[in-house]
């Protein structure tokens, strides 16, 4: 991120950003070379009596080679710079093989991020763990070891499906326990519970959306945060793969940009712009709204957390499990 007394470019985390820095270096080299050549000719013309003895017209007048050179050399330089610029534009295209897709919606004055979370790829072990986490969250527990043994016996006797659901619902409704007694849940029972969760939940895709605001409370700003860049949540991107962002706005024009990733895309009313990002390494990167969008323009910082694909998937799925919609669905499944 930018800081005081920083006179050079950011440490780019994308190939696009690195190519843009190289293009800037190339343009600067060409510009310096042109200035040196033009300055050299100006010195010769202004001091023609010293260098040519007052006979400079003899070498310049009707000099076709000189005319060809000062026409073709600049044209060649411009074509070369244009070719490199077009190559950079093609690199910025989203293209195919997108691993992570998301939608960014700008508001006055906050950001909204939306993901499509797919539970179909979960493994059975993760089913058990996540159901256990949900039971911890909703404070559901079973009565005592007697009830657990009773339920385990029911499982051993082959009670499945609706019968097991009714039995578990009876146990859950009778009493809710907190604390250490939750750890008494039998592993075999938990495995059986996870096995009859309907596929409509496990195999479906969830639209997970959340809003991000700037944190103004000074007590929440410690030494690990940056003033003006602390937000309630981050935007999650996968490292070493291609991420596609669809950027739009619900009101006025905004601009989503992160300098360290070498990206900036305008959010125009009535349009959906596409942006491709392929981070090279994990980390946290900061950006801003780069379009003056009103009095709250400075209150729209951006925090991007780049992690591995598995970590991003886990964070998003845990976020889905923490939503009220997901909890209500699971309550209907288990208690109904």
Image: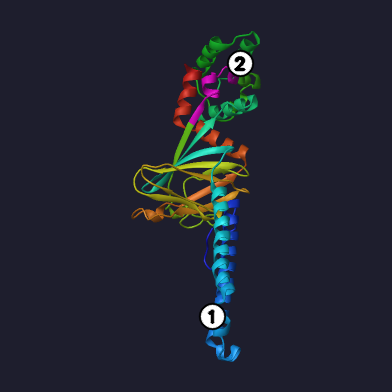
Q: Which residue is mark 1?
A: 61
Q: Is residue 48 above or below residue 164?
A: below
Start-end of magenta stretch: 192-206
Q: Is residue 318 above or below residue 263?
A: above
Q: Quadrant of residue 83?
A: bottom right
Tell which of 30 and 178 is nearer to you: 30
Give the percent coordinates (x, y) of residue 162: 53, 11
Give the residue at x 46% y 54%: 288
- 320 on left or right of 254: right
As helix, strand or loop, the secondary structure at mark 1 comes to loop
Give the percent coordinates (x, y) of residue 322: 50, 33
Tell which of 30 and 310 is nearer to you: 30
Q: Which residue is mark 2?
A: 146
Tell which of 147 and 140 is nearer to you: 140
Q: Is residue 305 above or below residue 327?
A: below
Q: Does the residue at mark 1 contact the one at mark 2 (Cβ under 8 Å)?
A: no
């Amino acid at each position: 991120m930018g800081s005081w007394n920083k006179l050079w470019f950011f440490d780019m985390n994308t190939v696009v950003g690195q190519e843009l820095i190289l293009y800037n270096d190339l343009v600067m080299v060409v510009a310096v070379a042109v200035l040196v050549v033009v300055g050299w000719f100006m010195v010769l013309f202004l001091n023609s009596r010293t260098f040519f003895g007052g006979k400079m017209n003899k070498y310049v007048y009707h000099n076709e080679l000189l005319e060809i050179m000062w026409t073709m050399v600049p044209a060649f330089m411009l074509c070369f710079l244009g070719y490199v610029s077009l190559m950079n534009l093609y690199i910025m295209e989203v293209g195919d093989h997108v691993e992570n897709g998301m939608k960014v919606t700008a508001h006055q004055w906050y950001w909204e991020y939306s993901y499509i979370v797919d539970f179909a790829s979960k493994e059975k072990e993760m089913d058990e763990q996540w159901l256990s986490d949900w039971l911890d969250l909703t404070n559901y527990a079973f009565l005592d070891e007697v009830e657990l043994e009773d339920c385990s016996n029911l499982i051993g006797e082959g009670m499945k499906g609706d019968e097991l659901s009714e039995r578990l619902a009876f146990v859950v409704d009778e009493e809710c326990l907190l604390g250490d007694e939750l750890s008494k849940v039998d592993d075999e029972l938990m495995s059986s519970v996870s096995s009859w969760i309907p596929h409509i939940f496990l195999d479906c895709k969830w639209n997970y959306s959340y809003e991000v605001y700037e944190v103004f409370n000074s007590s929440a700003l410690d030494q690990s945060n940056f003033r003006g860049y602390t937000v309630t949540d981050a935007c999650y991107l996968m490292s070493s793969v291609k991420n596609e962002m669809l950027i739009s706005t619900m009101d006025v024009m905004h601009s989503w940009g992160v300098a360290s990733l070498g990206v900036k895309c305008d959010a125009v009313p009535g349009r959906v712009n596409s942006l491709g990002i392929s981070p090279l390494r994990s980390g946290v990167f900061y950006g801003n709204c780069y379009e003056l969008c009103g009095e709250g323009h400075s209150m729209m910082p951006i925090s991007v957390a780049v992690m591995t694909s598995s970590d991003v998937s886990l964070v998003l799925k845990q976020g889905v499990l923490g939503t009220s919609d997901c909890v209500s669905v699971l309550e209907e499944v288990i208690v109904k």
